[in-house]
Structures are given as C-alpha cells and as structure tokens.
Amino acid sequence: MNNRITELRSEMKKQNLDAFLVTTPKNVRYLSSFTGSAGLIVITPEHEYFITDFRYTHQAKEQAEGFDVIIHQGKMYEEISELLNAEDVKAMGIEADDMNVSTYSRLSDLFEPMLVQTSGVIETIREVKSEDEIETIREACDITDQAFEHILTFIKPGVTEIEVANELDRFLKGKGASGMSFDTIVASGVRSSMPHGVASDKVIEHGDLVTLDFGCYYKGYTSDMTRTIAVGEVDPKLEEIYNIVLEAHNRVIAGTKAGMTGKEVDALARDYITEKGYGPNFGHTTGHGIGLDVHEGPAVASRNEKPLVENNIITNEPGIYVSGLGGVRIEDDLIVKADGVESLNRSPKKLIIV
C-alpha cells in the first residue's frame, strides 16, 4: 500500500473524516505520481479513486498505480457526488487553502456529505522526504551548482542583469531542468540590497556585488541556491558584511540537527547577525522547506516552535541588506539528519571576485 496514503488515512481518522478530496496539483502528484494537468483524488478508508478525463486515460492508468481510475463522462463533481453517496460518506475533507470560493459553493450545493475545511494535511506529510525524493533534489542541486560554475565565466562589466538571468535559465534547461524554481534573481550594485531584486536592465559595473538567487525544477522537484560575488574590488564595508553573512550561514550548518525547532535554527544565524549590529538589516527568515514546491514546510523562522525531523530538506539563507550600499545573501539546501545536516550544494562560498 502507498505509505503516503496510509499517513493521510491516519490523519483522516483523527479528524473523523470518511473521505478526503485532493485538488491541489502538487498533492495529486505526490499521492499518485500523476503528472498531467487534470486530475482529482478521492480517498476513503477502503478505496483510492483517481478521477480524470479521456485525455489522460492511458497516462492515469500508467502513473496512478493502485488507484481505481475513473474517466468522467459528464460533469466531474456530479460523478464524484454519486460516488460518495454510494460509499455512504458523511464528512469529507477538502483542501481549503487551494479551493476557490466558487468551487466550494458548487460542492456545497452538490454534495450531501458535510465538507470539512482542512489546511496543510498533505503538505505536512510532504515535509519528510523519501530516499527517492532526496536523490531527485540532489540531482536538481547538482544542476544548479553547474549553472553557478558556468555563470562565473559569463558575468563581467557591461552585461545586464537580465542577460545573466537568461543565461542561467538557458544553461539550467540545457542540463535537463523543466523550468525555473522562480523568476531568477540577479541584483547588482545598490540593487543587491533588494532581497528579491528580480533581474533588471541594469548594467553590471566594476565594483558591484552581484547576488544570484536561482534554482530549477528537475523531475518535479526543486532546488534553491544563492551566491553573492564581486565584480572587481568592492567597498570594504561590503566585504565586512559578506564575512558576517558567511559566518552566520556556517553557524547554521554547524549547529543544526533533528529535534531543534525552526525557531532555534533561525536563531543560529539571526543572533550572530544581531550581535554584529545588523539585526534590522536581516528582515526575512533564515530558511524554508523545499520539495515539490520551492517554498514549503518546515519554516526556519522565529515563529516555528515545531521540531525539525530527519529528512526534512531546508534552505539556509541568511542575508544583510543595507539600502544605498548593497546586500549579501548566501544559501544552501540542507538535509536534516539526526546528528547534523548535509549540504546538497558544492558551490564555493568564499567571496569570489570576477
């Protein structure tokens, strides 16, 4: 039996649910391995139903192994309603964070069972990665490392940020990536003080720090890495900031292990940066989980009192941003283990000058 469905059924039992409707595409893929664009899942205590249309007849039967595949002929939700009535379902969980109001209203009109709004049920299960998932993310990170090595030969005074971003995207896809994890961030000079400075037409100049935050999707899973480099000699204050961020980043690697809360891991970086006088200049969290989504749980943040567990994969990305001067961020993807972490990135973190 699919262990992921077993875990979902365990959660359903805790919430007194007779069925669970899965509509979030990433969660549909997680439970069934289905990669098409139209499919829903209904889980009951005894059955796993996969509902799609005629376009995916062959694909669903091939990928959704172990599911009862239903090819709906009429209106999908009417057919699901008939199915639930036949199963004598009284209460069905729905993914409230994904479902829009019009769909909820339609379901409420159609379904006799009570709709129970749930949040983060499958996403929480997804936080702990299987060995297969870890290997795929490892491969995505390897492609990202190769892209960084390549882009160091491309960046020079006179090229624009958008040219750098496009070259990164081109290289990643050439290595097998299906897409970017997010819009590639290339922020140079004073723009590097913008944590999410998506690439612009700005020309990179001698003396600029350049922050590169990028990643790719590979076989459905994502990577997320940041490096900050120098184009020629930079302001000594920026070098000082770089070294503080690097030390904060390294403290997270040295100090993190399973059992620590997201808050405790965040404090490893935040307390050091604060001690050095830049606390107000570090305004985002130290990290987040990655997997099928580039931002998922667990949060490496002061608000997260939940302990990390083995095989969480988290980012480690402290940063300092000084308006009018520039900024630095350094980021790796880490596997949480019982006695420490393993970095999935091999790209150097010593300040590189090109």
Image: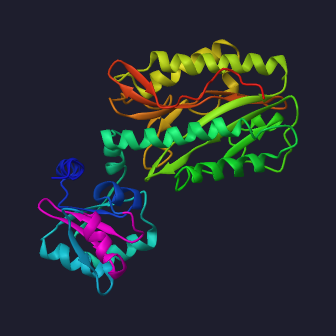
x, y percent for residue 49: 22, 68
Q: Is residue 346 above or below residue 168?
A: above
Front-lying residue, 4 or 122: 4
Residue range (magenta): 35-64
Left or right of 183, for residue 68: left
- Residue 226 position within the rendered picture, expressed as x and y whole percent measured from the top left: 62, 35
Is residue 269 visible in this depiction of the protein?
yes
Residue 229 vs residue 24, the one in the foreground: 229
Magenta-span inclusion, residue 116 = no
| Residue 270 visible in the shown view | no
Pick out the residue farthest to the bottom. Answer: 74
Q: Which quadrant of the structure image shows residue 188?
A: top right
Q: For residue 131, which quarter of the picture? A: top left
Q: Is residue 52 above or below residue 354?
A: below
Whether residue 300 sits left or right of residue 72 in the image: it is: right
Residue at the extreme top of the image, as rendered: 275
In percent of the image, x 16 and y 51: which residue is there?
A: 13
Say how the picture is coloured.
Answer: rainbow
Residue depicted at 50% across the width and 44% down the height: 295
**Residue 238, quarter of the rendered image:** top right
Q: Position of residue 68 (x, y in %)?
A: 19, 69
Q: Position of residue 201 (x, y in %)?
A: 83, 50
What residue is drawn where x is 83% and y is 16%?
Answer: 236
Q: Quadrant of the C terminus?
A: top right
In front: 168, or 319?
168
Question: Does 51 appear in magenta?
Answer: yes
